[in-house]
Image (spheres, grey):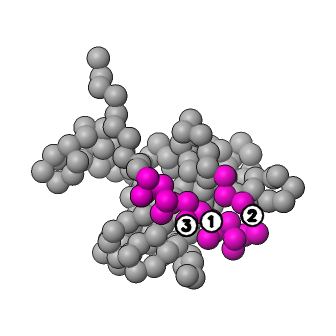
């Protein structure tokens, strides 16, 4: 039997995520609503009419945005966001907060990203075999800066 995967979200990471989500919601004149786990994305941005304006995945990184030329996201989250966008027409947005800036990437049909396999050894990561997975690489220059 495959062991159950640990949950890496904790009170601190959820607080950081919610703060960024609320900042974006304020910018967009919306309310950030946490989505159930089955949706695989973090938040829905809801307007005053209770319409969903965007579906948002939020990431927090402890490195500067300039350390790597791309942002790595699991292929599973990428395909979920795209599928929901294609079915509903609601924008799929990836919001990332690095140590030096915050940015958002809004998916556009046909965006050409690299797909590769992310392999992490126990010595380099948290020793979770499920971290070894297909990922997409999104160019950092596709992210629009979010002002603090």
User: Around disc 3, counting alpha carbons within 10 Å, would you say few (fewer than 14), some (14 to 19), or many (20 or more)?
Assistant: many
Residue 17 picture location, percent across and down? 51, 60
Write the residue at 69% across / 74% down.
27
Residue farthest top in this picture: 1
Q: Provide the residue designation for mark 2.
A: 30
Q: Is residue 11 left or right of residue 3?
A: right
Q: Which residues are magenta?
A: 11-33
Q: What's the magenta bit mostly, secondary-structure-wise? A: helix
Write the residue at 42% across / 58% down.
12
Write the residue at 38% across / 66% down.
61
User: Around disc 1, counting alpha carbons within 10 Å, would you say few (fewer than 14), some (14 to 19), or many (20 or more)?
Assistant: some
Q: Which mark is residue 22?
A: 1
Q: Are marks 1 and 3 in contact (CB under 8 Å)?
A: yes
Q: Is residue 124 left or right of residue 91?
A: left
Q: Provide the residue designation for mark 3.
A: 20
In this rendering, the count of numbered labels is 3
Residue 71 picture location, percent across and down? 40, 64
Residue 120 visible at all: no
Q: Is residue 98 left or right of residue 43?
A: left
Residue 67 visible at all: yes
Magenta-colored stretch includes residue 137: no
Quadrant of the image containing the C terminus: bottom right
Q: Secondary structure at mark 3?
A: helix
Q: Is residue 78 above or below residue 130?
A: below
Q: Are marks 1 and 2 in contact (CB under 8 Å)?
A: no
Q: Is residue 65 above or below residue 124?
A: below
User: Around disc 2, counting alpha carbons within 10 Å, would you say few (fewer than 14), some (14 to 19), or many (20 or more)?
Assistant: many
Residue 96 picture location, percent across and down? 48, 66
Alpha-carbon distance for marks 1 and 3? Answer: 5 Å
Alpha-carbon distance for marks 3 and 2? Answer: 13 Å
């Amino acid at each position: 039997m495959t062991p159950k995967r640990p949950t890496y979200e904790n009170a601190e990471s959820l607080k950081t995520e919610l703060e960024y989500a609320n900042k974006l919601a304020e910018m967009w004149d919306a309310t950030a609503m946490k989505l159930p786990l089955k949706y695989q994305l973090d938040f829905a941005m809801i307007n005053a009419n209770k319409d969903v304006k965007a579906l948002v995945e939020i990431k927090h990184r402890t490195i500067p945005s300039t350390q790597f030329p791309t942002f790595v996201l699991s292929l599973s989250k990428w395909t979920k966001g795209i599928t929901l966008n294609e079915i509903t027409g609601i924008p799929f947005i990836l919001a990332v907060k690095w140590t030096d800036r915050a940015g958002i990437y809004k998916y556009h049909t046909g965006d050409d990203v690299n797909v590769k396999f992310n392999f992490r050894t126990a010595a380099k990561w948290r020793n979770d075999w499920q971290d070894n997975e297909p990922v997409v690489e999104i160019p950092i220059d596709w992210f629009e800066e979010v002002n603090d």
